[in-house]
Amino acid sequence: MEIYLDTANPDHLQFASKFPFLNGITTNPSIIAKEKDSFKNVIKRINQHIQGKVWMQVTETTAEAMYQEAIELKNWVDHPVIKLPMNEDGLEAAYRLRQENIEVNMTLIYSLSQVVLAAKADVNYISPYIGRMDDQSLDGQTFIKHSKEIIQSFGASTKIIGASIRNTQVVADLARYGYDAITIPFPIFKKMFQSPLTTEGLAVFQSDWEKYTTSLK
Ligand code: E4P
């Protein structure tokens, strides 16, 4: 499973850079807006810290303008993925970009009919927002299971990237069920390292080791 972090915060990037096996960084306009710098500077800073893919979302609203914006964005980083909203203009622009071998992601996916269109266009990634679906009792994990069936029925290469992740259990579930990719908010990523049992167990090992080394003196 490809694993991305959903952040543009410099401290988070610094931490993430210690784990180069991660696949990269995803962003969206709300994530960029938290940083007090230009879009380009924020993205270039991410690219300096991260070896993997950097995902950037277009903010234009017509297919032609989204396409032109994407052509500029892709030059900002080494391994770009262009995020486009799943609507008529977004999919039209995405398909054009695909013809030029630019990786694209349809974001804000909430219905299976959207999945049908994205799979038919064979876009690289789709982002179902699992947490926001669960917030509305729309059962995000059942949705991605059905999405996978649709993609397989088309024989498409489209990957599902689980987005809007609210807890570590969803991360484990998606990995266990063999999903393609996930993007994780930083606080959830930090929690993935932790267990009180690990902390307690380590404290016992350290204390026993101290007693042992003291006894040898
Ligand atoms: C995905 O592309 C989005 O950036 C993201 O996962 C949204 O998550 P949120 O619901 O926590 O804002």
Image (tube, rainbow, N blue to C red):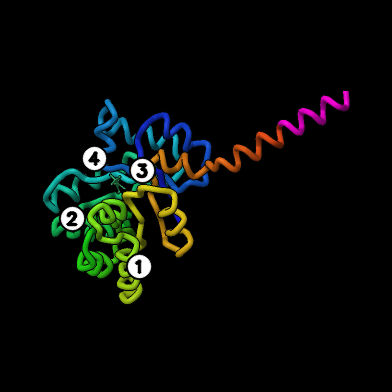
Residue 47: x and y, percent? Answer: 39, 37
The reply to whether callout 1 and callout 2 are in contact (CB within 8 Å) is: no
Q: Amino acid at mark 1?
A: Lys
Left/right of residue 158 with respect to residue 206 in the rendered view = left
Q: Amino acid at mark 2?
A: Gly
- Label 3, on which residue? 6
- Label 1, on which residue? 145
Specify start and end residues of the magenta stretch as a single range: 207-217
Q: Label 1 vs label 3: CA separation?
A: 22 Å
The reply to whether callout 1 and callout 3 are in contact (CB within 8 Å) is: no
Determine crowd level at label 3: few under 14, some 14-19, many 20+ residues with C-alpha closer than 10 A: many
Q: Residue at x 22, y 45 (%)?
A: 58
Disc with the residue nearer the chain's start (3 vs 4): 3
Determine crowd level at label 4: few under 14, some 14-19, many 20+ residues with C-alpha closer than 10 A: few
Task: Name the quadrant containing residue 120.
Answer: bottom left
Residue 102: x and y, percent? Answer: 31, 54
Disc with the residue nearer the chain's start (1 vs 2): 2
Residue located farthest toward the right when viewing the structure as drawn: 216
Left/right of residue 157 with respect to residue 69 in the rendered view = right
Disc with the residue nearer the chain's start (3 vs 2): 3
- Residues 199 and 145: in front is 199
Disc with the residue nearer the chain's start (2 vs 4): 4
- Label 2, on which residue? 90
Q: Residue at x 27, y 35 (%)?
A: 32
* Residue at disc 4, secondary structure: helix
Residue 65: x and y, percent? Answer: 14, 47
Left/right of residue 195 with respect to residue 163 in the rendered view = right
